[in-house]
Image: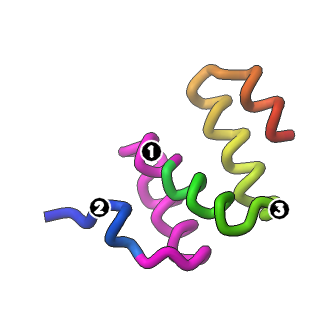
């Protein structure tokens, strides 16, 4: 049984760990981790950049640019 994102400890380092472990296999779950980081710390530059990269990987350049 895999742990859902809701059961993951919500501290920022743990959320980044979740993101980097899941970005290639479950990109939408990984994006949820970025969203939670930005909700807690909207000025976190690593999360902002990772979110822009995530949108680029999804082919959404317009939204990616809004994060840069």
Residue stretch in magenta: 9-31
In the displayed structure image, the side of residue 36 where residue 5 appears, left or right: left
The residue singled out by tag 1 in the image is 24
Alpha carbon distance from label 1 to label 2: 16 Å
Q: Which mark is residue 43?
A: 3
Residue 27: x and y in percent read 45, 42
In the displayed structure image, the side of residue 49 where residue 40 appears, left or right: left
Q: Residues within 10 Å of mark 1 (few under 14, many from 20)?
A: few
Q: Is residue 2 above or below residue 8?
A: above
For the C terminus, the image quarter is top right
Number of numbered discs: 3
**Is 13 in the magenta?**
yes
Alpha carbon distance from label 1 to label 3: 25 Å
Residue 21 sits in quarter? bottom left
Residue 22: x and y in percent read 42, 54
Q: Identify the element where label 1 is drawn.
A: loop
Q: Is residue 52 above or below residue 11?
A: above
For the N terminus, the image quarter is bottom left
The residue singled out by tag 2 in the image is 4
* Residue in front for this viewpoint, 6 or 58: 6
Residue at (60, 30) in percent of width and height: 57
Residue at (50, 74) in percent of width and height: 10
Look at the magenta stretch and give its main secondary structure.
helix
Residue 23: x and y in percent read 48, 48
Instruction: Please tell me which of labels 1 and 2 falls first in the chain.
Output: 2
């Amino acid at each position: 049984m895999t742990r859902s994102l809701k059961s993951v400890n919500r501290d920022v380092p743990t959320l980044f760990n979740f993101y980097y472990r899941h970005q290639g296999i479950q990109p939408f779950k990984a994006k949820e981790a970025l969203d939670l980081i930005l909700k807690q710390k909207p000025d976190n530059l690593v999360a902002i950049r990772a979110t822009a990269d995530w949108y680029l990987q999804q082919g959404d350049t317009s939204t990616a640019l809004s994060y840069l």
